[in-house]
Amino acid sequence: MLSLLVYPLTQALLLGILSLCLWLLRCGRAGVTALALALGWLYLCSTALVADGLMASLERDYPPRALSATPEAEAIVLLGGATRGDTHMSTLGDLNQQADRLVHAAALYQAERAPLVVLSGGGQPGARPEAEVMRDILLVMGIPERALVLERGSRNTHDNAVKSARLLQDRGLRTVLLVTSAFHMRRAEALFAAQGLQVIPAPTDYQRLVIEPVLPRWLPTVDGLARSTHAIHEHVGYWVYRLQGRIQPPGV
């Protein structure tokens, strides 16, 4: 729940509540200031200008790479986050905006970059683990079940790394192609490397716009707010793990 505090929408809501309280306490000028900060912060984070800048700071070190230029490895590790879980109206799990992860992992396997795909993702209590949802979708995409290894217990990126590494090391495997969104790769790569794995980043799902959007970049949009939220979450998550000693600074 504490992670919600880094979301721009939550921060704007809290500032709005603070503004109301200040008005009730007859602190009009302070209340206006708090309200202006709330609206200004929400506006900035909702623009493509800010969202692209935040995403660029995460994605610039992980440029796209053609399948033919991707090195071979002993296994592909696909991180969860690409599905919304099972739905009542579908026989397969519902995909979300990070579904490029599934497509990229399937493409890497079909290009014979690795003979094994580790699916890493748990689930909420009472729900199917995301690893199982991803397995069902990859089977439909033509990936044979014998090539799939499921890690069902992880709840966050650190769990992904620890539990996937255990499965890989039990099989004597160490070199992996790590598939996740480009904006998530810095944190994921550091966590997997900390488990003694040789990590080859295989980023996908790029969020920074490379063509001019339909709307001017200074206009607020839901998409801009969503991308800014993801980027801020990643920056904060990376530094929290650094402070906890779970990952090491680059070059250490």
Image (spheres, helix red, strand yellow):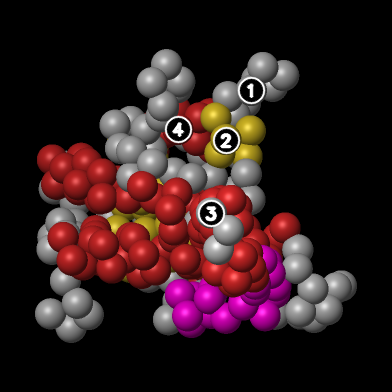
Q: The disc labelled 1 sits on which kind of residue?
A: Thr
Q: The disc labelled 4 sits on which kind of residue?
A: Glu
Callout 2 secondary element: strand
Of residues 130 and 216, the one drawn nearer to the viewer in this rendering:
216
- CA gap between label 4 and label 3 equals 48 Å
Residue 51, position as x, y percentages in the image: 61, 72
What residue do we see at 50% from left, 35% from top? 134
- CA gap between label 2 and label 1 equals 8 Å
Q: Earlier in the sequence, mark 4 or mark 3?
A: 3
Of residues 240 and 13, the one drawn nearer to the viewer in this rendering:
13
Residue assigned mark 1:
87
Residue 25: image tag: 3
Mark 4 or mark 3: which is in front? 3
Residue 90, position as x, y percentages in the image: 69, 22
Q: Earlier in the sequence, mark 3 or mark 1?
A: 3
Q: In this image, 67 relative to 195: left or right?
A: right
Callout 3 secondary element: loop
- CA gap between label 3 and label 2 equals 43 Å
Of residues 204 and 45, the one drawn nearer to the viewer in this rendering:
45
| Residues shaded magenta | 37-60
Determine which quarter of the picture holds residue 193. bottom left
Residue assigned mark 4:
130
Residue 7, position as x, y percentages in the image: 50, 56
Residue 42, position as x, y percentages in the image: 64, 65
Q: In this image, 210 relative to 63: left or right?
A: right
Residue assigned mark 2:
84
Q: Earlier in the sequence, mark 4 or mark 2?
A: 2
